[in-house]
Amino acid sequence: MRAHYFAWLLSVSAIGLSAQQHDSHQHDTHPDTAQDIESTKLAPKQSAVTQSAITESVLPQTVQLYSCPMHPHIQQHEPGNCPICGMTLVAKSAPMNAQVQVNGAMQQALAIRTATAESRTLWRFIETFAQVQYPEDAIHHSHIRAEGWIEQLYVRSLGQRVQAGEKLFSYYAPDLLVAQDDYLQALSVSQQNGSRSANLLQRAETRLRLLGLTDKDIKQLQQSRQSQYQITVYAHQDGVVTMLNVRDGMYIRPGDTLMEITSLQQVWLTADVPEAQQSWLRQGMAAEVDIPSQHISGIETRVDFIYPALDAQSRTSKVRMTLDNPQQQLQPNMLLPVRLYGGELKDVLAVPRDAVLLSGTGSRVIVQEGDNFSVRKITTGNSAQGYVQVLSGLAAGEQVVVSGQFLLDAEAGLSQLPVSTAAHQH
């Protein structure tokens, strides 16, 4: 019945065949296959061409299976009861392997194409996208070490660019004023007593440094001999203000993060790599980045770091790259195409990706041997350049179907069902 149904399904493709070809196909029917057709039941007669266009040949070796009438997916090789409903398992014979036989003319009509499983070199290649981020090692925080009040704020907005040495803000701190007065007294005593007061002066100067005064501030204090009521804080590096938590007149304390300045001379790129391709990742692997908005492509870089944790939702692993950004063309949160190159896999058995059929239980291919087509389970490895590495299940030189394999796979799957013993009516 299955063979007749499949033949009827494919008969539309055989309309262009001549009557003479139909007759020859009718005489070439395999005796065993004809007997199998006679033992199955299908509604009304099929034409000779549909009976001979495609037949199913089951290997004589069979294996005894026991399945549940209510739950057919429950199958085992020995008698017993169904673990779900408790019913007694029913014996049935299932073929160990099924072959679908398609003659040359029908193969041409169905546009069946094959490719050879052969050894080749595959390049490990991952194409993904990366997000531009601030480099975490280029962030500088501005804090004060003595509580006080903001007197003058020179940075007014988030995102403002600043240069190293540029004024950020000035503040008044009572403790700093007292420390300056103590230092001036120690300086005066040191000049009178000479080296005997050197230790006192050194301790007073250290106190000023610990409270946040720079060498420039201390030198100015020595020259002016006048305590400064307002202390100015300067930028330590070129960059962009990425955090601003202060305003004019605010009361500030040592624990407050007043500003955050991030250098954009370099940026980080973080890319997501699927879990299945994690084995390709290694620190130092080559990468290329494109900047579509700037019409720039092929910027070379390398993977600096592979994050140890896997994202629970996207099931991807993150990798990080670093790019120089002297012109600051790269802005945080930009999304850029990235290509990761993981090296080469030499002399691996591979088949075209189109030939591999995927299912929940694994991968399989349709193997051609003359006019016979059979399903073969395989174990796959890496995938690259349109090919899939085959670890087991195939040998070099075997032909696999790359076009039309779905119909052949469906008919081979039908052959695994129990065969009806009703007589076929002609």
Image (tube, grey):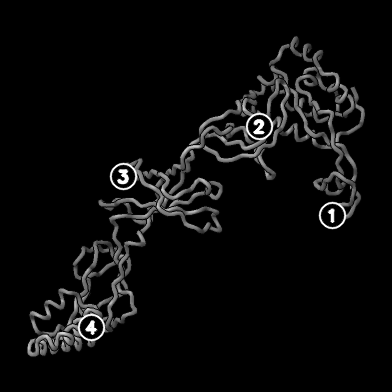
Q: Quadrant of the N terminus?
A: top right
Alpha-carbon span between mark 4 and mark 3: 52 Å
Alpha-carbon span between mark 1 and mark 4: 80 Å
Name the residue tied to disc 3. Answer: 294
Image side of residue 65 versus residue 377, left or right: right
Residue closer to the observer: 8 or 291: 291
Q: Residue furthest front?
A: 196
Alpha-carbon span between mark 1 and mark 3: 64 Å
Residue 139 image position (x, y, % from top left)? 32, 64
Upstream in sequence: badge 1 or badge 4: 1
Upstream in sequence: badge 2 or badge 1: 1
Q: Quadrant of residue 369?
A: top right
Residue 236 image position (x, y, % from top left)? 24, 67
Res. 207 mark: 4
**Badge 3 element:** helix
Nearer the observer: mark 4 or 3; the answer is 4
Crowding near the residue tagged with mark 2, few <14, some 14–19, many ≥20 C-alpha atoms within 10 Å: many
Nearer the observer: mark 2 or 1; the answer is 2
Q: Quadrant of the C terminus?
A: top right
**Badge 4 element:** helix
Q: Quadrant of residue 101?
A: top right
Name the residue tied to disc 1. Answer: 83
Upstream in sequence: badge 1 or badge 3: 1
Residue type at mark 1: give it: Pro
